[in-house]
Image: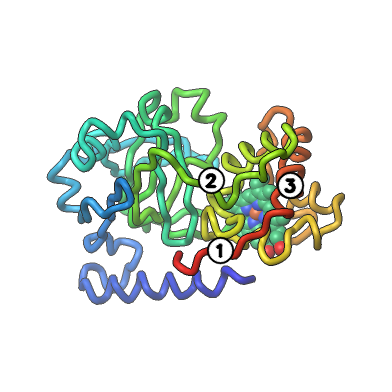
Amino acid sequence: MGISLPRTLQYLLVMFSGILAGAFPLAPAFAQNDINIEFRGAGESIKVLSLDELRAITPAVSLKVFEIHENVERTYRAFPARPVLDYVFGKDWKKVREIVFTSIDGYRPSIPVAKFLAHDAYLAFAYEDGTPFTLTNTLQNNETVQLGPLYLVWDNIDSKALLAAGASDMSYQIKRVALESTSDLSNMSPPSGSSAEAQSGFMHFRKHCMACHTINGEGGGKAPELNYPASVVEYIKPEYLKRWIENPISIRYNTTMPGLAKEIPNRRKITEELIAYLKAISSSKRAPPETN
Ligand code: HEC
């Protein structure tokens, strides 16, 4: 329940800013003229770009994508990501380890730069057919979500690897793009001397959970903190925690948390390692920093 109120507020805010912009007062989903995307590198703001400024960097194209959130094909108007990254950061972005996208709803995936070199990413800002820029997220209890300001999509139609990777790197509501060379995750790293199982669990947590959740304040802001002041391993019974990770809807009927994807190989082992990590980090609680 905690996240539904802010969501409504966000929607009102988007609608209100649409009215202020005077773009399409009756169709807030189209009000994309006033977007401002912040680009950050080395902890500093480098540029803030509007849609027109993005258009001046590289022309928009039409891109057909298999929309994993909805299980259908969709055609987007989008900018190829590489020329935008080249323009903002110079060629050196390719030497960095990860690109972190921050969404309005708090989702914050870190995506390896290698993925942007191996595959074609695009920043979408509208549907080609001009319908409202939203989708129905079948992975999140069929919530209708706003996709703008920008939506990270991939040229995935002919790529088995991208289709198998699922929707976690398709990030919507992007407002900020940041390069991370050495991601400092000192607050959420397992304490020294933790088991190999807990160390693997930490890697899984970074891949599958950190875009939404924080541990000791580090991570995404879309879902609850899991370690501080009390850890989920302390207040959720072990058998329920396992079930929650694999199939949250079997515990809370209307939850928007997606379970660990069924396609992931060794899913049971991954769940166990995740829990080993959560147990290890529960002995190292730290108050999240004040700022967000
Ligand atoms: C797309 C975002 C998202 C991802 C990814 C995600 N979660 Fe969640 N998670 C949520 C949301 C939202 C809630 C709150 C759900 C609710 O209250 O119904 C939640 C709740 C939880 C809770 C219960 C917390 C409580 O106190 O009730 C646990 C435990 C949890 N998640 C663990 C995980 C683990 C482990 C992973 C990685 C395998 C993960 N989550 C991945 C969004 C996410």
Compare residues 36 and 256 and report the one nearer the observer. Answer: 36
Residue 28 found in image quarter: bottom left
Q: Position of residue 106 (x, y in %)?
A: 48, 59
Within 10 Å of disc 1 (Cα), the crowding (few <14, some 14-19, many 20+) is some
Q: CA distance from mark 2 to mark 3?
A: 36 Å
Quadrant of picture, ligand 1: bottom right
Q: Residue furthest left?
A: 56
SS state under label 3: helix
Q: Is residue 201 above or below residue 3?
A: above
Residue drawn at the location 76% of the way across and 52% of the way down: 244
Compare residues 272 and 16 and report the one nearer the observer. Answer: 272
Residue drawn at the location 76% of the way across and 42% of the way down: 276
**Residue 288 numbered tag:** 1
Apparent side of residue 26 relative to residue 160 in the rendered image (left or right): left
Q: CA distance from mark 1 to mark 3?
A: 18 Å
Which kind of residue does numbered mark 2 sit on?
Glu
